[in-house]
Image (cartoon, rainbow, N blue to C red):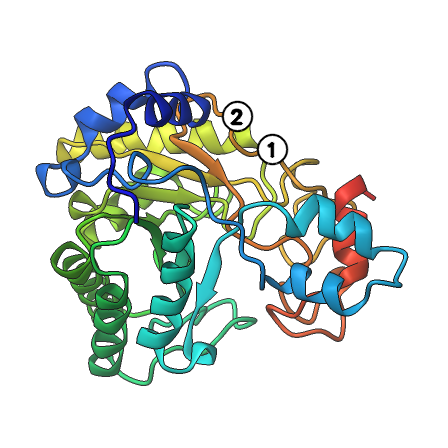
Amino acid sequence: MRRLLRTLAASAFVCLLLPLGAGQQATAAAPTATASADPIGMTSGFYVDPYSTPAAWAAANPGDGRAAAIRDNIASRPMARWFGSWSGNIGAAVGSYVGAADAADKLPVLIAYNIPGRDACGGHSGGGAGTPSAYRTWISAFASAIGSRPALVVIEPDSLGDFSCLNQAQIDERNAMLKDALAQFAAHAPNTWTYLDAGNPAWISAATMAQHLDGAGARQAHGFSLNISNYYGTGENSAYGNAVNGSLSASHGYAKPYVIDTSRNGNGSNGAWCNPGGRRTGAVGQTGGGAEMLLWLKTPGESDGDCGVGAGSVAGQFLPEVAYKMIYGY
């Protein structure tokens, strides 16, 4: 990893990603536990995964008429890599991925998706570690594999919006696991920015989400994420994120930077969340309305489950026709 000071390069990079005043907001909002980390300043841009599902499909199907468009418009863009039980040895999987990004002097974005009772109420992406103890072992190995290398990590999408089918004891157990996950990253991955997931504007009220975030230890996180695997427009998410921060500030005395998943929000939402048709990839790098960054956290073309235009597929399966149409918005 190149540790040379990047005063001009880092400043220019942050200016591309942050709206006017957002850098000051992030500095003021972040607690001292995360203030020393600067994964953006330590790297020269975001990592493009050469083995993402769209990249692998395009490489395996060079004669397909859709391959060039998918390669050039999706596979060539920085996206998050998701890690769960399918990843095998989590330490080896995370270490290999972060190591490849580090060797290229790029910033990887990772998503930890293995909490027990995952997607308990939705059901399409159910699973996760078998017990809280097993999850603690898994997330500790995840954090340790990153070590001192720079990274962004989103911790457990949907976990704080998914309370409708949980009793209080289950909620308390989940919050304890999320707090411990944040502690593991603070202890073992000091140059990682962690984000708890805060759902999307149509799920629960901003005030309720602020309560959920605080209950899960958001004060110890760098920030929170919005719109993961969903389709709501950037403006709607910014308004929601600002409202969540308003409630955090009013009720708990702090606010946090937030990032928005724009991977599939180019046409906004039609009200459906599970493989709706007519969606489009969204912008990255251009920020506004208070967001710290616009990122592709879901891979365009990966299915939400056996539903909508992905009927017959399983969650996470890459669907080239869906990806191709998402490039053009039809």
The residue positioned 40% from the left and 21% from the top of the image is: 12
Quarter-of-image position of residue 263: top right
Residue 81 is situated, as x and y percent measured from the top left of the image, at 48, 60
Quarter-of-image position of residue 98: bottom left
> Mark 2 to mark 1: distance in Å?
7 Å
User: Which mark identifies residue 286?
Assistant: 2
Furthest toward the top, the residue is: 20
Q: Amino acid at mark 2?
A: Gln
Q: Is residue 146 above or below residue 190?
A: below
User: Which mark identifies residue 283?
Assistant: 1
Label 2's element? loop
Viewer-side residue, 303 vs 212: 303
Left or right: 319 with respect to 171?
Answer: right
Left or right: 90 with respect to 58?
Answer: left
Quarter-of-image position of residue 146: bottom left
Residue 120 is situated, as x and y percent measured from the top left of the image, at 43, 72
Label 1's element? loop
Left or right: 214 with respect to 316?
Answer: left
Q: How many residues crowd around disc 1 within 10 Å: few (fewer than 14), some, or many (20 or more)?
A: some
Residue 147 is situated, as x and y percent measured from the top left of the image, at 21, 60
Viewer-side residue, 223 vs 240: 223
The residue positioned 51% from the left and 67% from the top of the image is: 122
Q: Amino acid at mark 1?
A: Ala
User: Which mark identifies residue 231?
Assistant: none
Q: Is residue 259 above or below residue 323?
A: above
Viewer-side residue, 218 vs 212: 218
Residue 214: in sight, yes or no? yes
Please report contact status of discs 2 and 1: CB closer than 8 Å, yes or no: yes
**On the rendered image, what quadrant is the C terminus found in?**
top right
Residue 162: in sight, yes or no? no
Q: How many residues crowd around disc 2 within 10 Å: few (fewer than 14), some, or many (20 or more)?
A: some
